[in-house]
Amino acid sequence: MGVDLSTFLAVYGSVFDGNLYSWSIGGPDDRVSIPLNLLGEPQGISGSHNKYEGDASPTRGDLYVYGNDYDLVLSRFQRLYDAGKAKNEYDLQLLTDLRHVSFQESLNTNPYFFNAPFAGVIAQPAAWSFIYRFMANKSEEYPSGRLDGEVLKSFFAITGEDGKFVYNRGHERIPDNWYTRNVLDDYTIPYLELDTIKMANQYPEFASIGGNTGTLQVDTHVVGDERNGL
């Protein structure tokens, strides 16, 4: 990850979910004191819904449907795995199409689905593009990376056979024989912007700001009308 992108994400998180100079990767923590925070008790990344973390995640559930926004939902991982298992490959186009499915699912099942200016329009595409951009295994044959099912499972702490997967919380790990991005090819803010724009050009609803207002979307083909607030 480029210095510009990592710095921005760290600063944003410490401002909105921490005490301006530190923040918890879980929920509230006594070690992250309150005096310097202008937004109340620092909630950490697990309490950052609609500030840093948003709905329509690749593998996590919407907060108001599942009750939390941080535990992996096996059915969502299975759907992600199934989408690429025929070719045993998970690229950005596959993830973009699957993001569209998840976005529509949130509209249809979450009465409080919200696509926030940062958590939705900016952070949500990163949650999807990062899977390929950072998890794909780089090589001379695949300089941009190739992401297969076994690598995907390792990063998401999944073991077991297809259809009988087990989520091992806290055991996410870099796979064996895995190679990161070239040091001369950092994933920077402009790089993320290009991926974000490319996704939004294919599915314009990704760039919409707003959400459901206590009721569910009825017509899955309608996005951006008064019924869902977008």
Image (cartoon, rainbow, N blue to C red):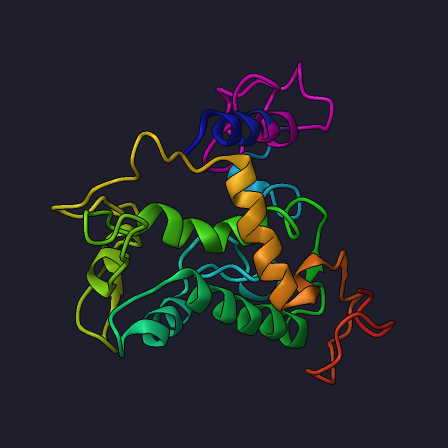
Q: Find out whether residue 32 is within the magenta segment.
A: yes
Name the quarter where the N terminus is drawn: top left
- Image-quadrant location for residue 184: top left
Q: Measuring 61% from the left and 29% from the top, which residue is drawn there?
A: 12
Q: Is residue 221 above or below residue 106?
A: below
Task: List x then y, in percent, for residue 167.
Answer: 28, 60
Using the rendered view, name the quadrant where residue 146 is placed. Answer: bottom left
Q: Is residue 44 above or below residue 87?
A: above
Q: Give the left or right position of residue 167, taking residue 215 as reference.
A: left
Residue 135 appears at what percent x and percent y? 31, 49
Where does the magenta region start and end?
A: 12-41
Residue 31 visible in the shown view: yes
User: In the visual, does 211 lie left or right of 154?
Assistant: right
Instruction: Please indicate whether residue 115 sits to the left or right of residue 185 in the image.
Output: right
Q: Could you say where residue 7 lies in the image, as x and y percent from the top left?
A: 52, 25
Q: Nearer the viewer, residue 140 or 119?
A: 140
Quadrant in which residue 212 is drawn = bottom right
- Which residue is located at x 78 percent, y 68 percent? 214
- Quarter of the picture holding the C terminus: bottom right
Residue 53 shows in the view: no
In the image, farthest residue toward the left:
177
Can you give x and y, in whole percent of width and height, for residue 216 in the image?
Answer: 73, 76
Up-down relation of residue 30 to residue 142 (above or below): above
Count the labels in the image: 0
Q: Nearer the viewer, residue 219 or 139?
A: 139
Q: Is residue 127 left or right of residue 1?
A: right
Q: Main secondary structure of the magenta part?
A: loop
- Residue at the image position 65 percent from the left and 52 percent from the top: 120
Q: Residue at x 71, y 28 (%)?
A: 40
